[in-house]
Amino acid sequence: MRILLPTGSATVGIVKAAARGASSRHDIDVVVTGDIASFLSPGDLERLLRGGGYDMVIVSGMCSASFAGVERRTGVPVYRGPRHAADLPLVLPVLDQIRLSKTIPADDFLAETRREEASRKVAIREEEADPDFIIRGVKIGGGARMKVLAEIMDAHRRDDLEAEVRRLFADGADIVDLGFGFDAAPEDVERCFSTLEEIEGPLAVDTQNPLLIAAALFRADLVLSLHEGNLPVVGEAVADAGAAAVVVPRERTLPENIAAAEEAGICALIADPLLQPVGSGLTGSLKGFEGISHPLF
């Protein structure tokens, strides 16, 4: 297939590289029509098509002009390419499989393809990543990707907790966090986690109450959060259960609390410096990131 790719001088290098990548499938001419590809006029395009023997034209998806008249007079279909030249390598290899639009930019058509390709690349990198530790099959830290933790507040008040947890995992959460307010009792925590025995993904318990933390350790894979106020009470129990834990500063510094958690025997630790918002201690809290070798929350 012989294709004309009009472009601007600002992006000609990117477009030519994309054309070379598809040269085994198509005969592609890249022609500079001005500084900016989207400023292409119907008259300029029609002059380019005379005697060229082209099967199609792919113009910038940013073009606002109508090329319907050019198509009628030349018999060459004019399709909208992607808005950005950098996306051409995603379009040219699949021209045999899709039909581009004459009015809608190609990247709108290829959004799903791009998502699938991105997901595939992320999955490959994640499989190859060397993490600091693993929580129920989910890699944490090291070269692993950032993880998504979804929180269910006041889990003990939910009518159908299992359905909510399953929905969050289906929506892409890596870990589901069950939060418990001040009115929750250990029996509430046990009940909630017991109803989730069929859930395969990692679950976290979100409370600083050591009694509630202890009540969740028969199933919780991650504890949020530990500090000098609860570590002396429940630290060893967390270690014995093999759970991971998020450690935060309180009256003691983050490094001090991490050291206490390690002394309690907890091997899988995530550091949370408790970053404050702008105007409320942001600069000071940023210091908490210094010298932390553990994964960050």
Image (tube, rainbow, N blue to C red):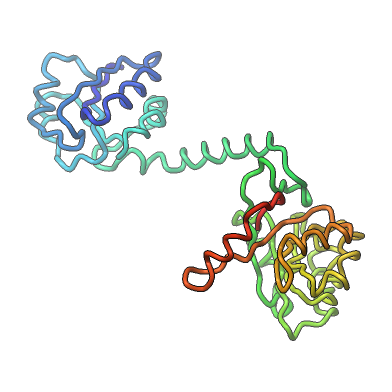
Q: In the rendering, at what x and y percent does residue 249 appear?
A: 70, 67
Q: Residue furthest bottom?
A: 183
| Residue at x 69%, y 64% (from the top left corner) | 165
Q: In the rendering, at what x and y percent does residue 183 appear?
A: 74, 86
Q: In the rendering, at what x and y percent does residue 272 appear?
A: 67, 61
Depth check, front residue: 267 or 137:
267
Q: Tell me: 56 left or right of 113.
A: left
Give the answer, above or below, for where 274 lies relative to 208.
above
| Residue at x 65%, y 58% (from the top left corner) | 297
Give the answer, above or below, for where 33 lies relative to 169.
above
Q: Tell me: 68 left or right of 106.
A: left
Q: Tell me: 162 left or right of 150.
A: right
Q: In the rendering, at what x and y percent does residue 239 appear?
A: 88, 59
| Residue at x 73%, y 84% (from the top left corner) | 182
Q: Which quadrant is the N terminus positioned in? A: top left
Give the answer, above or below, for where 36 lies relative to 228.
above
Q: Quadrant of residue 24?
A: top left
Count the marks: 0
Depth check, front residue: 83 or 275:
275
Q: Quadrant of residue 50?
A: top left
Q: Quadrant of residue 4?
A: top left
Give the answer, above or below, for where 250 lies relative to 126.
below
Q: Tell me: 88 left or right of 103.
A: right
